[in-house]
Image: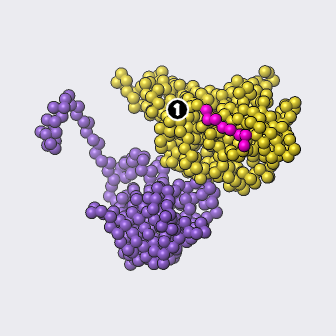
Amino acid sequence: MKILVPCKRVPNPDLKLKVANGSVDLAGTTWQVNPFDEYAVEAALRLTEKGKGGERVGEVVVVSIGPKDTSAQLKQLLAMGANRAILVAGDDSALDSDLVARILRAVVAAEKPDLVITGKQAVDGDDNQVGQILAASLGWPQATFLASILLAADGKSATVTREVDAGVEERRVRLPAIMTVDLRIIGKKAVRNEALAPATAEWEDTQRLASLKGIMAAKKKELREITVESLGVAGGILVKTLRHEAPPARKAGVKVASVEELVAKLHNEAKVI
Amino acid sequence: MAPIELDVSPAQVERIEAVARFARERLSPGARERDARGEFSRALWDEAARFGLAGLPIPETWGGSGLDAVETMQVVETLGRTCEDGGLVFSLCAHMFASAVPIWRSKDAKQQGLYLADIAAGSLLCANGTTEPEAGSDIYAMKATARRVGDDYILDGTKCFITNAPVADLFLIYAKTDPSAGFLGISAFLLPRATAGLRVVPEHHKSGLRTSPWGTIYLEDCKVPVTARMGPEGAGAALFGESMIWERCCLFAYYVGAMERSLRRCIEYARDRKQFGKPIGKNQSIANRIVDMKIRLETCRLLLYRAGELHRQGRRCEDAVAMCKLWISECAVASGLDAIQIFGGTGVVTDAGVDALLRDAVPAQVFSGTSEMQRMIIARTLGVG
């Protein structure tokens, strides 16, 4: 089983965004792997684990598109356990979901994975489009917002669940497929490969972190840097960003002297009670 | 003479960031509650060990990370900045520097083969037994003996204030094989917990480092085979001395990181907290405390990495290590008091965790050689005392 996991680097979401001159100022920000993509790597690793021999069976390849220092995030994913990494040189500001999906389609054509797993969306743009566009352009089935994956023993299909408004939806999907994962995919028993792991298999109730041993092991793993041109993909984006604006500052609140005054204001002014 | 390097390499940054994230996300949650209960969590120990925190300086051959003193300090300092569970870090450091290091440095291939991989992996948790009721600073006055009887040794004695003793799987015990030989009369022994004649009594709670358990070890007619000895007879004191050099520099890196964590909190509080209509940091008396905390932090860091660099280069560093240990522990106490004063009433609310630096730092003036003993070492190198 070869699994390709597209991952995006995102600005640290805990830092306060600076918006100046119509754009977000990212100078001085720190970068990290998009959390949902980290969960996708965790899911992919689990699908290759807990077989009888204890060794990883299959290959997890992580791919990212970004500037040269995106290698720091890819190294972190190699330290988590991914087998190798591909960095497609690109400029964050010259990418949109369509171009990312076209680049990934070329990577899929070159790598020929059995399965592509990625995060449901990146926490910076929150576009939630790459997985879907990639599936459509490849003509592969897509299973999005997954809360669990059970890969069939024959490796030809998977039973997946997704949380929807009415409850939990269960579906079967043929492979090769595109899967996008949601938060619950890192639950103890959320992901399993029937060909490897027994039904009793459990993982930690969270994604693994790069350990010191993992960091040492990652130094020996391949991190290949390629260009968009080498993939035969033409640049050009469809989405034009006009400007970014910070939300208007909130007005100061009002202090009330008594419960009665509060109730009166809620009733007469806010009209919520 | 190689220069003293203070810059951090990209590979070291990668390691530091991984440690910081692991400590923040996995070790710190629940630390204040565990501290209040005086609770050591073996599950958390195992997780920290799996991450690689039980074998930092141990060579990769045995599954450690093979870090030198400076790199080890960087990791431990990072834990100080990001791990609120000071007791857990203290237990890990005691395991690594006072037990794993002497076993590694003993060059005793048999003992290393038996234990070192499991120690570096943290599946064997270690405690070292040196201090006795009547042998603290005067450590070579220890009374514990190991009498050779045929192919066995009979160990007798009491070891007190032993970090990790209630939870340890393996004990490194120092005892006299030749009471008349002073420094050269002390030998080291490795005793699994189940050894007949070895009994551990947990001690009462402590004021600081409360999540690190400690206890008293009683050795009563404790018969062990000759093969339990580590290194040749008489090598114990030298091994102990070397382990203390590692401990005095690398463990104290934790306090440098903890001082930075406390400083950041104080700065934030001094900016946010308003009295008399302005942030309290606008008062010079508060700002000056913060400045003093900053200067203490930076001087501690310089002394720390200077000692580490001398150690890494294999140069004489006993006095540099003594100054580093002494200065860091005393600065941590002073900054711990400043932090409480800046926070006022909140500073003494245990749940708020502001007092943790002080509570964890006071014992640091005592363990690994008291401040008084460090001053003696420094005085000696100056040709006085």
- Give above or below for A65 relative to A22: below
Residue shown at the point (79%, 52%) measured from the top left: B110
Query: Which corner quadrant of the image does residue B344 belong to?
Result: top left
Which residues are drawn in magenta? B196-203
Tell whether position A267 is magenta. Answer: no
x and y, in percent, of residue A90 in the image: 48, 64
Residue shown at the point (78%, 42%) measured from the top left: B223
Principal secondary structure, stretch drawn in magenta: strand
Mark 1 — on which chain does it sit? B
Identity of the residue furthest to the left in this view: A268
Looking at numbered disc 1 in the image, what kind of residue is underneath it? Ala
Tell whether position B199 is magenta. Answer: yes
x and y, in percent, of residue A229 in the image: 50, 72
The answer to whether B229 appears left or right of A148 in the picture is right
Count of labels in the image: 1
x and y, in percent, of residue A143 in the image: 37, 70
Query: Which corner quadrant of the image does residue B98 belong to?
Result: top right
Q: Nearer the viewer, residue B377 or B289?
A: B377
The answer to whether A197 appears left or right of A264 in the picture is right
Chain B painted colour: yellow
- Give above or below for B56 relative to A188: above
Chain A painted colour: purple
